[in-house]
Image (spheres, grey):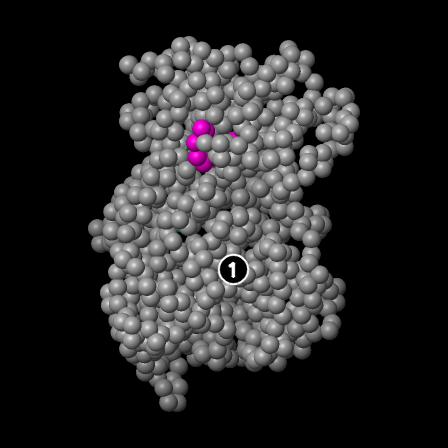
Amino acid sequence: MGTMDAKPDESRRILFVDAFDSFSNNIVGILKECLEAEVILVHMNDELVHRDLLDILTLFDAVVVGPGPGHPANPSDVGFINKLWALHGTDMIPVLGICLGFQSLCLLYGAHIKRLQQARHGIISRPCHSNADIFAGLINLETTQYHSLHVDLLGDEETRNVFWDCSKACPELLPLAWDTSDGINGPILMGARHVSKPLWGVQFHPESICTSTDGKRLISNWWSHAQAWSSDQRRVRMKMPSWSQASLPPGPSRIVPGFAEQGGSARDPSCAHFVHQVRSTIGEKDASLQWEKYSTVPVSPTTIIEELGYRNNDVVLLDSQGHSSGRFSIIGFVLPRKTIKIAYRVSDRMLRYELIGKQGATQEAAIQLDSIDQVWPMLQDALVACDPRKQRLHCRSLPEDSPFWGGLMGYISYEAGLETIDVEPHRSRASSDLPDINFVFIHRSIVVDHKEGELYVQSLLPNDHDWIMKTRSIIETLATQGEIRKRPNLTPAMAKSSETGNLVKVLATAKVTRPTETSYRNKVLKCQDYLAAGDSYELCLTDETTIHLDSALDEWALYKRLRKNNPAPFGAFLRFSDTVIVGSSPERFLSWTRDGKCQFRPIKGTVKKSADMTREKAHAILESSKERAENLMIVDLIRHDLSGVVGARNTWVSKLMVVEEYEKVYQLVSVVEGQLPSPALEQGGPRGIDVLKASLPPGSMTGAPKKRSCQILANIEQRPRGVYSGVLGYMDVGGAGDFSVVIRTAVRAGAVADSQSLHMGDSHDNISRPTNDDKQSFSGSNVWRVGAGGAVTIQSSDEGEFMEMEVKAASVLGALFSQK
Ligand SMILES: C=C(O[C@@H]1C=C(C(=O)O)C=C[C@H]1O)C(=O)O
Ligand SMILES: NC(=O)CC[C@H](N)C(=O)O
């Protein structure tokens, strides 16, 4: 490790060894909070750290080995972790193992690692403990468990009782705690230490939001014991020559947790050209926003779109659909030869941008990127270049209460999310379907504030006052005359019935291919095999229904029908180029305000509404341990994602598992929030887009731990998910953003329909299967996809999961095929 100054330094420094878990940043957070330690995170398979392990350990006071998927006997799951338990002599260093880490410690000292009768994922229990060592004084210890495997010290097999002395088989492992609450599994070892070495471990997760504050005291106790051992041994920690990450050999997994992980990627030279192109659409002068705000009686954003002549034109609508919990609706107008479309595909890593409505290649630029990481700074720079606050001194004030002033509207697919976490996407149909990142830069917009009864008409285009005044006047007329107006030739009733007529006629020809019950239930059982083996704690399984039509559908009519039948706070209608998306999502993924407050609203836990399902009954079901465990796992995962960017100190849970009511279902919802540093105070610090990219794909659509779960799901599902399971929303030039999770949504397939989607094999049920002759007549634009699924846990039943998936699919399909 080169020359090192042998002088000890005062600060505390811990090495955290991450086994690719989705809770690691939460553990780092409590190490920092309780111990005020500097924490460096490395992955357990980091070859350079492995190679120089002994030297590297001299730079640290202690090591924490984290949880993770898999089995401690499997080298690819634990990497160099075993080495830490086997250190001896002056190489020894205090180590704490958590869950997988704990199991690997015990395995090395003779214990057997066995499967639990029933895995415990997201289960809360009160272990009984020795009230000594690292458990001293923890009288209110309530812990969260996430494990399928357990440690067997081969003690009192016969009576299955707890014991507190070393067993004959494991004479070096002293038991410290047991979970005795579980009748099925019997007593489960929850904590142990090595009798003479500075090695400890706990089976539960001290960092979980549902572990009591004694979890933190346990960490402090461990630190005191570790310190006492080090001073007894006169162990001296070496000083880093000058503290920086560079003191460790360079490599992708050396991380000072916090924003460094997301580290500002170097700008590609082509970025400047892209930013210039976007910037040039708002004119020569500094960006400015022209806007009008006024009070209005309620007007529906769909009526506004129709009145302004966009019924059949490209437009983006983020619509709170009259849902009680949706405050704003936002309309972004797509302008031929003005609006730039930005598209990135994972399959070839090409970024393309072009002016919409300009035919011919001259206007299109295509850049070959090395990775998706290069896309985010381009988007961010383009937004900043058009920020009207830059010339604030020269222009009138800005509408601070309007969440969107203009900027990017569109979506990021599930596969784009997979690329961010280095998981290989499923490749079928990748080249023929929609782009993975797909945004338009919106200049003209309308924001409806349903709560305050206010409306904003806004434009980033220079000299656009006339459009603003004209638009305002059309909407005012609309508001004063009421929405039901007489038109010369067409009464609203007639217009409506002709819309419905078209839908009914086209949908009557639909060939609907749905997942079969047998295949879906088998997939649930496969998921549960992985859960029982310890490879995942929760898997959000999904499948897809495809609808083949033999003529084009009136997508606007379809959208209106969906918003009426299944209103939800994150309704969406997107139509530009090849893209048509019609959605009614209940779930916010992530929003951030201009002053950096971030919010996630994960939903996990679903109960179907029906005549005999009262609110009370739904509450009772959603309060069961099955539903709460599902939700808890995602809350802990999202805390990890968010705190990896803003730090655990700036991350909190403002609502934990509350029941919300939607049109067709009750859902269990939590709210996780965080605070980014103020852009004014911290130049170059993380922004909303950094939180976004660090949190993809949405945890509620993956399960935990995220990376391993996504690999397993790709294998079981055998299809790309596309836009479904991705995120959809906007990023505003003023620095705000809001994205929903793309669920309860119908997506029109890209222009070239993939022949594979017509050959779904026997896992799908063709209500009416197209014949060979039919195939010719389908173009991509007449194929629609509706994804649906749900979180599978060890407590799920295959039948129950199939029904849940069907209920969710029906919230869209039912609306499509209803006669109303
Ligand atoms: C997978 C879907 O929904 C997700 C799964 C949920 C669940 O398991 O309870 C709830 C909301 C979504 O996060 C879907 O609607 O298709
Ligand atoms: N949370 C964990 O570390 C889990 C460890 C191991 N994969 C198990 O399931 O038991």
Q: Residues within 10 Å of mark 1 (few under 14, many from 20)?
A: some
Q: Main secondary structure of the magenta part?
A: loop
Indicate the position of residue 739 as horizontal and vertical percent values.
Answer: 50, 57
Front position in the image: 354 or 819: 354
Tell me which residue sits at (57%, 60%) in the image: 349
Task: Choose top left, top right, bottom left or bottom right for residue 512.
Answer: bottom left
Q: Nearer the viewer, residue 265 or 466?
A: 265
Residue 215's spot in the image, x, y percent?
49, 26
Q: Is residue 728 above or below residue 797?
A: below
Q: Find residue 466 and report its image quarter.
A: bottom right
Dot 1: element: loop
Give the answer, above or below, for where 467 lies relative to 78. below
Specify start and end residues of the magenta stretch as a single range. 65-73
Q: Is residue 493 shown to the viewer in this render?
A: no
**Quarter in which the C terminus is drawn:** bottom left
Q: Residue furthest bottom?
A: 488
Q: Could you tell me residue 473's position as x and y percent?
A: 54, 79
Instruction: Indicate the quadrant where residue 565 lies.
Output: bottom left
Res 377 seen here: yes
Q: For the point 50% across and 15% down, which residue is it? A: 194
- Residue at (68%, 39%) from the top-left corner? 250
| Picture quadrant of ligand 2 | top left
The residue labelled by disc 1 is 347
Determine whether 686 is above or below 124 in the image.
Answer: below
**Residue 494, position in %: x, y?**
32, 83
